[in-house]
């Protein structure tokens, strides 16, 4: 299991539109090969900062399968206009639970 963590800064004033875009995109993630869930978190201290957490079976399910899909293009179309900068993405694995 791999967790994608994307830190996303949005343009001030677009927070609600961005959140709606992510909500509309949730089915795109959930039907993607290897995806078992996603959550969007908003920073309390920095209200234009979000973290998107997506659970993938493998790294390639995200980096190859999803990013190479039409659904990825749809995702970016739903939310990309709200980005203040390109998202910072990393992948993690649980080592202690």
Image (tube, rainbow, N blue to C red):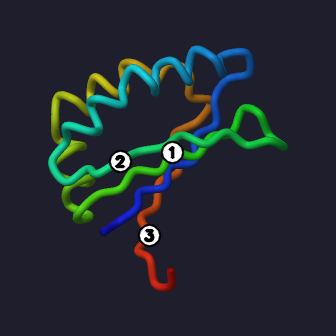
What whole-number distance in Å separates the C-alpha atoms at marks 1 and 2?
A: 11 Å
Label 3: state its secondary structure.
strand
Looking at this view, name the residue that lies furthest to the right: 45
Q: Quadrant of residue 23?
A: top left
Cα distance between the residues tagged 3 and 1: 13 Å
Find residue 6 and report its horizontal and vertical position in percent. 50, 49
Density class for disc 1 (Cα within 10 Å; few <14, some 14-19, many ≥20) is some
The answer to whether marks 2 and 3 mark residues whose Cβ atoms lie closer than 8 Å is no
Extreme-bottom residue of the structure: 96
Residue at x 41%, y 74% (from the top left corner): 93
- Mark toward the start of the polypeptide (3 vs 1): 1
On the image, the x and y values in percent for residue 59 come to: 26, 64
- For label 1, the SS is strand
Q: Name the residue beneath numbered marker 3.
A: 92
x then y, percent, for residue 16 = 63, 17
- Please report the residue visible at 40 percent of the width from the left and 61 percent of the height from the top: 3
Mark 1 or 2, closer to the camera: 2
Report the disc number at residue 37: 2
- How far is mark 2 from mark 3, CA to CA? 15 Å
Mark carried by residue 52: 1
Residue at image position (40%, 19%) is 78
**Viewed as shown, does residue 11 lie left or right of 1?**
right
Mark 1 and mark 2 lie on one chain; the one further toward the N terminus is 2
User: Within 10 angstroms of label 2, few (less than 14), some, or many (20 or more) residues?
Assistant: some
Residue 46 to residue 55: above or below? above
Binning the other alpha carbons within 10 Å of mark 3 as few (below 14), some (14 to 19) or many (20 upward) gives few
């Amino acid at each position: 299991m791999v967790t994608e963590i994307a830190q996303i800064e949005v343009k001030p004033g677009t927070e609600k539109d961005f959140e709606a875009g992510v909500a509309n995109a949730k089915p795109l993630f959930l039907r993607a090969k290897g995806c078992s869930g996603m959550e969007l978190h908003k920073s309390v201290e920095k209200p234009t900062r979000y973290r998107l957490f997506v659970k993938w079976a493998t790294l390639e399910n995200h980096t190859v399968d999803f990013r190479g899909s039409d659904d990825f293009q749809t995702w970016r179309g739903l939310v990309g206009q709200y980005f203040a900068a390109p998202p910072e993405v990393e992948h993690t694995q649980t080592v202690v639970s």
